Image (cartoon, grey):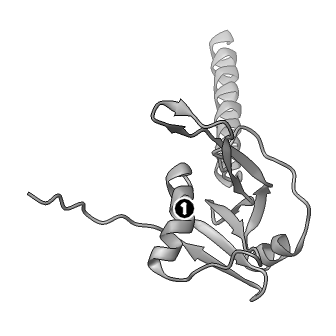
Amino acid sequence: MSRIGDLLATLFVGLVLIVWLYYRFRRWLEAPVRVRLPVPEAAPFTRNEAVHLLEDAGYEVVCGRVKVPVLVEVDDEPLEVASRLFVDFFARKDHELYLVKVSRARRPMEWTASGLRDRLMMYHWLFKETHGILYVDLEEKRVRKIRFDLGETEIPQ
């Protein structure tokens, strides 16, 4: 009789384990995807007009203003005054992470390929793991998505 009891106990434990694994797997599938930020920690942000425009466009702001120090050397000598770049926010939509720049009245955006390249391409290179750049135009109350795709390089011979 102990063989049957051992067999039933083993089947019961196996069944409980299978049910537990099934529910853990389902929970894992339904868990939200975490988007890794390309910065060490998420900076707090205030809910301002730019954040509301992003949310109205379906984006979730996940990080506030980030300062990126830029050290510059000329002829192997560092310049005395360091520079920096600022990212206004990081936002996500559909598990894709975007860098966000907010319009400035004193520095309007030139909506040409070369104007966008000169103003925003450095952010594309700096944060390659993002899916693009969101430009929040406060005057037009509009969010624009910008992506850069580099073509083939042709080297003259």
Circle 1 packing at 10 Å, graded few (<14), some (14-19), many (20+), is some
Would residue 128 be visible to someone looking at this image?
Answer: no
Q: From this view, report whether residue 150 is shown above or below residue 37.
A: below
Identify the image quadrant of residue 1: top right
- The residue singled out by tag 1 in the image is 131
The residue nearer to you, when weighing 97 against 65, is 65
> Residue 94 in the image: x percent, y percent?
63, 66
- Residue occupying image coordinates x 66% and y 73%: 135
Q: From this view, report whether residue 2 is shown above or below residue 7.
A: above
Would residue 49 be visible to someone looking at this image?
Answer: yes
> Residue 157 in the image: x percent, y percent?
8, 57
Q: From this view, report whether residue 12 is shown above or below residue 125.
A: above
Identify the image quadrant of residue 65: bottom right
User: On the picture, is 29 further left or further right than 121?
Assistant: right
Q: Secondary structure at mark 1?
A: loop
- Residue occupying image coordinates x 77% and y 56%: 62
